[in-house]
Image: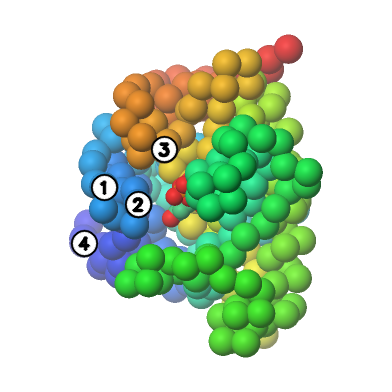
Amino acid sequence: MARRRQLYEGKAKILFEGPEPGTLVQYFKDDATAFNSQKKGTITGKGVLNNRISEYLMLRLGEIGVPTHFVRRLNMREQLIREVEIIPIAVVVRNLAAGSLSKRLGIPEGTRLPRSIIEYYYKNDALQSPMVAEEHITAFGWAGTQDMDDMVALTLRINDFLTGLFLGVGITLVDFKIEFGRLYENDDMRIVLADELSPDNCRLWDSKTNEKMDKDRFRRDLGKVEEAYQEVARRLGILPEAGMRDLKGPETMQ
Ligand code: UDP
């Protein structure tokens, strides 16, 4: 088979040309970066787990009517996705204070926020992805007001759904980052969830012990990084070792 043409290499993923027009192949690497790439490393097996976890979450979201770029998983590290025009805004949703919010505003990590907070960051490595307001986004044309309305509505649904899904397997969804793209079909344009959903861009804490089960273990040198990603997959019932045919459902926690 001819080698796929590489279109783009990011920090954790590579995009290849897809088998048919309008599709791409998304390859998940084990590479990990933090603090705007000042910290670099490898998390063995991360790509395989994130491919699975993202597939699982995007499929579940699809079932409740959240449109996503996901088509199907191709193999251990690759998934087929629809080609979208990425909106250059990272949308962060927070349920509990952590990370940059705690640092900037002096709110202790783990404080339950009075309501979920949505923040926007302009995706630009050279500028270290600064936080921006909706005003900047619409004024500079990164997204229109209708795009913003669609993104907020989808983001709130995604947050509610994922909060419940993770809570069901004993995990608190503290915060997460998502990205959206514009999907053009015939004469229509729809905003769809793109990129990935995995412990690389979510903060996931064990509901009972508050132990971190996400990329903070890498960022903060807490150790047992691979184990944490595996445990998330295990609780979701999608550990790769289980094999595709005998995948268990989520392990419900009381
Ligand atoms: N996040 C991400 N990519 C980034 C920055 C943040 O996926 O480039 C995620 C991060 O994993 C967390 C959420 O967005 O779940 C909020 O991150 P925060 O703003 O607290 O930044 P951090 O402390 O991670 O630098």
Residue 39 appears left or right of 95: left
- Name the foreground residue: 168 vs 177: 177
Q: Position of residue 150 (x, y in %)?
A: 73, 68
> Could you classify mark 2 by the number of other residues whose Cα lies within 10 Å: few (under 14), some (14-19), or many (20 or more)?
few
Which tag is nearer the camera, tag 4 or tag 3?
3
- Amino acid type of the residue that numbered disc 2 sits on in the rendered structure: Phe
Q: Of circles 1 and 4, which is in front?
A: 1
Disc 1 to disc 4, how far (Cα)? Answer: 35 Å
Label 4: element kind: loop
Q: Earlier in the sequence, mark 2 or mark 3?
A: 2
Q: What residue is pinned by disc 3? A: 215
Give amino acid for label 4: Ala
Q: Earlier in the sequence, mark 1 or mark 3?
A: 1
Instruction: In this rendered view, identify the residue nearer to me: 30 or 137.
Output: 137
- Horizontal side of 248 relative to 21 (left or right) equals right
Badge number at residue 39:
1
Q: Are marks 1 and 2 in contact (CB under 8 Å)?
A: yes
Label of residue 2 in the image: 4
Q: Which mark is residue 35?
A: 2
Label 1 sits on a secondary structure element that is strand
Q: Is mark 4 within 8 Å of ligand 1?
A: no
Residue at left 26%, top 66%?
Answer: 6
Q: Residue at x 67, y 57 (%)?
A: 118
Q: Position of residue 15 (x, y in %)?
A: 34, 62
Mark 1: few, some, or many residues within 10 Å (few <14, many ≥20)?
few
Q: Identify the amino acid type marked 1.
A: Lys
Q: In percent of the image, x 21 and y 62: which residue is there?
A: 2
Label 3: state its secondary structure: loop
Q: CA distance from mark 2 to mark 3?
A: 11 Å
Q: Disc 2 beta carbon < 8 A from ligand 1?
A: yes
